Image (cartoon, rainbow, N blue to C red):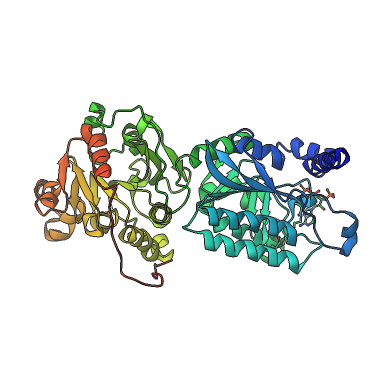
């Protein structure tokens, strides 16, 4: 018996050693942690239970039969984050560059299946050279098996990808089908084809960092939801995000003790809106003042800044917030902000997370770039997502709500449950200046007349009362009381049920 136990320990040590000291040293020299060090930081202490530690590949070509490291380049299993169940895979770059073989894929599929069966999220830590070159099509098949499970789990359990090294070629499509992608500055990149292929095909010269580094995907493409300075910070922030998320689509949002009075009055909000309607203010100030303990987890902070998305808690329960940001492009809706908002609203609706919408929107951004880029379809995504969402929806119009953008931003007409407006709200088909220029074109040469007409239009429409008279706004509220009003509204909606007609699925404008 003793010998067998010793043999088990020997084998475990070997598996835990990954690709050996030299390669672990190289990994550390790049500023990266190993697959197991990452799991240790991600999960609660001593909570990790490993699967398939001794799985080895079955390839024989290219001398592979002689090199069969235990674990085959990925560490998989389950554990807890602040006591809540989660399944994890962590690719080990020190073993064949973390490349994906048939058996490596089978290990990932096993925990994806377990997560779906047991209703718990999957977190993937990606650090891989892509398809195991020695295995060819068996590796491609493995990827497709993982992809299919990403699709099957979508909207059932949250899926989070953290890119902590290379992620290239078709391999990017597994993270792309998960709910959130996070990256690490300077050590991670994602692209479908690398710099060499780009040079050959398009003659463009570009570095891996420029093509698919964290800055590219968090600022330009919007593929990634956030980036962190290093592995340690990334894993700590994933733990923080995890605390906001439901375990699956049936459990509802997590609740936790709260020490912040839901009736907290915020007198400073009464002066948040500047006297001049064209002057910006920071909508995140309002978000933080509404949130329990001011805790706000922002999603995609560096992309489409004119729209703010993220999670907060009210009475200890997660709420998704979508807000126009007057500080960036005056808070207009455009292609990127519509995509960003739509994706977030769909995530919240899929996982039963109530949605708070804060509106200060002057309309859609005009211009050829927007029209040629398909703002019609992209704007429709946000409209569709709101119209489709059956979770509790509470809306607060702080200032501008103009034109089609008024309709889109969780209006009463899209089955908003509570639609509040501050007294500073201006709900109209368009801004006074633009309206007067169209209505009184003949008086354009007379600035006094135009000024008088503008004042007249503002007096008539630049307020919340026209909409309130029609019941499109349920109540005009004092800014200082917004936290209490919103918290009470969500509390009253906890048992909301809204059925939608049967269909296989909708045909949303993707
Ligand atoms: C097998 C691989 C590998 C791979 C790396 N290694 N990628 N082994 N299959 N795909 C091994 C290396 O041989 C090396 O082994 C170790 O991992 C570390 O690699 P290095 O090149 O020394 O590391 P580094 O300089 O950091 O470069 C990392 C890299 C590079 C940029 C990822 O290794 C690379 O370009 N790899 C190939 C990438 C690729 O073309 N993959 C296939 C893409 S096609 P030793 O023993 O020396 O430590 C694809 C299709 C997926 O992925 C389709 C899905 C639908």
Q: Of residues 154 and 375, which is closer to you in this image?
A: 154
Q: Residue at x 33, y 35 (%)?
A: 315
Would residue 457 be seen by someone viewing this image from the given angle? no
Return the x and y of residue 323 as percentages of the image width and height: 34, 45
Q: Of residues 192 and 371, which is closer to you in this image?
A: 192
Q: Is residue 25 positioned above or below 299 on the image?
A: above
Return the x and y of residue 83 as percentages of the image width and height: 52, 37
- Count the marks: how many? 0
Would residue 183 be seen by someone viewing this image from the given angle? yes
Return the x and y of residue 309 as percentages of the image width and height: 40, 45
Q: Quadrant of ligand 1?
A: bottom right
253 displayed left or right of 218:
left
Return the x and y of residue 141 as percentages of the image width and height: 69, 67
Q: Residue at x 69, y 37 (%)?
A: 37
Quadrant in the picture for the N terminus: top right
Quadrant in the picture for the C terminus: bottom left
* Image quadrant in which you'd find residue 24: top right
As drawn, the residue found furthest toward the front would be 1
* Image quadrant in which you'd find residue 2: top right
């Amino acid at each position: 018996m003793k010998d067998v136990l010793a043999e088990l320990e020997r084998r475990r040590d070997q598996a835990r050693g990954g690709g050996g000291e030299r390669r672990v040293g190289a990994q550390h020299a790049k500023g990266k942690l190993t697959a197991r060090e990452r799991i240790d930081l991600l999960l609660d202490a001593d909570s990790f239970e490993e699967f398939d530690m001794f799985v080895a590949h079955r390839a024989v070509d290219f001398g592979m039969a002689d090199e069969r490291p235990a674990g085959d380049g990925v560490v998989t299993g389950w554990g807890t984050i602040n006591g809540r169940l989660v399944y994890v895979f962590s690719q080990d770059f020190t073993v064949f560059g973390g490349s994906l073989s048939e058996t490596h894929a089978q290990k990932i599929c096993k925990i994806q299946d377990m997560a779906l069966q047991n209703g718990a999220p999957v977190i993937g830590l990606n650090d891989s050279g892509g398809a195991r070159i020695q295995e060819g099509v068996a590796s491609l098949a493995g990827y497709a098996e993982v992809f299919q499970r990403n699709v099957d789990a979508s909207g059932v359990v949250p899926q989070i990808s953290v890119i902590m090294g290379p992620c290239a070629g078709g391999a990017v499509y597994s993270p792309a089908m998960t709910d959130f992608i996070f990256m690490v500055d300077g050590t991670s990149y994602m692209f479908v084809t690398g710099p060499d292929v780009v040079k050959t095909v398009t003659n463009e010269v570009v570095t891996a960092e420029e093509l698919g580094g964290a800055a590219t995907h968090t600022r330009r493409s919007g593929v990634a939801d956030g980036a962190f300075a290093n592995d340690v910070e990334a894993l700590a922030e994933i733990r923080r995000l995890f605390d906001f998320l439901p375990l699956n689509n049936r459990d509802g949002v997590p609740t936790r003790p709260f020490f912040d009075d839901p009736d907290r009055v915020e007198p400073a909000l009464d002066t948040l809106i500047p006297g001049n309607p064209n002057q910006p203010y920071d909508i995140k100030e309002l978000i933080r003042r509404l949130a329990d303990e001011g805790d706000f987890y922002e999603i995609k902070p560096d992309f489409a800044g004119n729209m703010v998305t993220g999670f907060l808690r009210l009475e200890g329960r997660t709420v998704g917030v979508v807000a126009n940001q007057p500080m960036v492009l005056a808070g207009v809706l455009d292609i990127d902000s519509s995509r960003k908002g739509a994706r977030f609203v769909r995530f919240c609706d899929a996982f039963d997370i109530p949605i708070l919408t804060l509106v200060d929107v002057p309309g859609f951004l005009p211009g050829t770039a927007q029209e040629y880029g398909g703002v019609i379809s992209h704007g429709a995504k946000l409209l569709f997502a709101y119209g489709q969402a059956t979770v509790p929806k509470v809306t607060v119009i702080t200032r501008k709500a103009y034109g089609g953008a008024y309709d889109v931003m969780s209006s009463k007409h899209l089955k908003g449950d509570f639609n509040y407006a501050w007294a500073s709200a201006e709900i109209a088909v368009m801004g006074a200046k633009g309206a007067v220029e169209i209505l009184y074109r003949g008086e354009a040469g007379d600035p006094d007349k135009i000024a008088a007409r503008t004042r007249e239009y503002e007096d008539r429409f630049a307020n919340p009362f026209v909409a309130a008279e029609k019941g499109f706004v349920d109540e005009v509220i004092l800014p200082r009381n917004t936290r209490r009003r919103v918290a009470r509204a969500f509390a009253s909606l906890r048992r909301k049920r809204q059925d939608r007609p049967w269909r296989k699925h909708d045909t949303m404008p993707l």
